[in-house]
Amino acid sequence: MISVASASRERRPPSDKAVPKAEQIYEMVRYAIIRLSMVPGSVISEKELCLQYGVSRTPVREALKRLSDEDLVDVFPHSGTYVSKISFEVAEEGYVIRRALEIESIRRAVQYVTDDDIARLDQLIREMRDILERDALHEYIEVDDAFHSAIAGISRYPRMWKFINLVKAHLDRMRQLSAPVPGHLAEVTEQHAAIVRALERRNADQAELAMKIHLEASFAVMSAMYEDGQYFRRKET
């Protein structure tokens, strides 16, 4: 059985008392699942969540229902609740949606990007390189997401990233699995740098190409994780 206490130490739930408990539980458990602190196939204890938050089962079940709707949790009546295994098909769908939207986003960003925006993106790349130097790979995905979210903001479609974030949960778990692949994140960092340089030149075609290369190469590495299989839902034959 997986303890959610370790996940809380990684990311504390929202401190605002106005945030409903069900929302807090949902956010914390979702984060732990995506970051693989709660590994695919592991048991989720409703009782432990109730004790941790000092709540009844109602908000816990509300949070788990939302996670089940996202296919991140499997609920089996009279049996138990489990972290779902990764669905390659759902991850691939998330990738296709993300790719289409980010290509649109990067082309729009070229129209609006400022020198201050370039400086901010370069700062994020420096943070990525620092993470690699420290070998703190578990921190990388946060900065990676900040980079792509910043581009969505520059494009003046900030809600686009919120939608992408919703559909890429299974993809994010594959991203986490692929992080230790030798040289992978170093290559990702250089791909990010190529995207920024194209933005700096205000060249939409180059920016689109750089984004395509980045997303397609990253997904190819992530797809190789499927061959391992232990954390993945296998297709029924």
Image: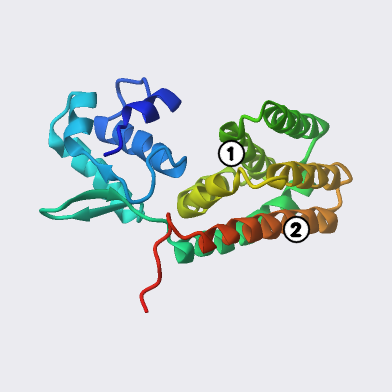
Q: Residue at x 46, y 60 (%)?
A: 229
User: The residue under label 1 is which amino acid type?
Assistant: Ile
Q: Residue at x 79, y 54 (%)?
A: 210
Q: Residue at x 31, y 46 (%)?
A: 42
Q: Secondary structure at mark 2?
A: helix
Q: Which residue is mark 2?
A: 213
- Compared to residue 170, the image places residue 30 above or below, namely above
- Compared to residue 169, the image places residue 122 above or below, namely above
Q: Secondary structure at mark 1?
A: helix
- Residue 8: give x, y in percent of width and height: 37, 26
> Does residue 163 appear in the picture of this structure?
no
Seen from the viewer's position, the closer of residues 211 and 101 is 211
Determine contact: label 1, label 2, CB under 8 Å: no
Is 99 on the left-hand or right-hand side of 73?
right
- Residue 16: give x, y in percent of width and height: 35, 21
Instruction: Compare marks 1 and 2 and give the one earlier in the sequence.
Output: 1
- Residue 232: give x, y in percent of width and height: 43, 59
Q: Which mark is on residue 141?
A: 1
Give the CA separation, mark 1 to mark 2: 18 Å
User: The residue under label 2 is which amino acid type?
Assistant: Ile
Q: Which mark is on residue 200?
A: none
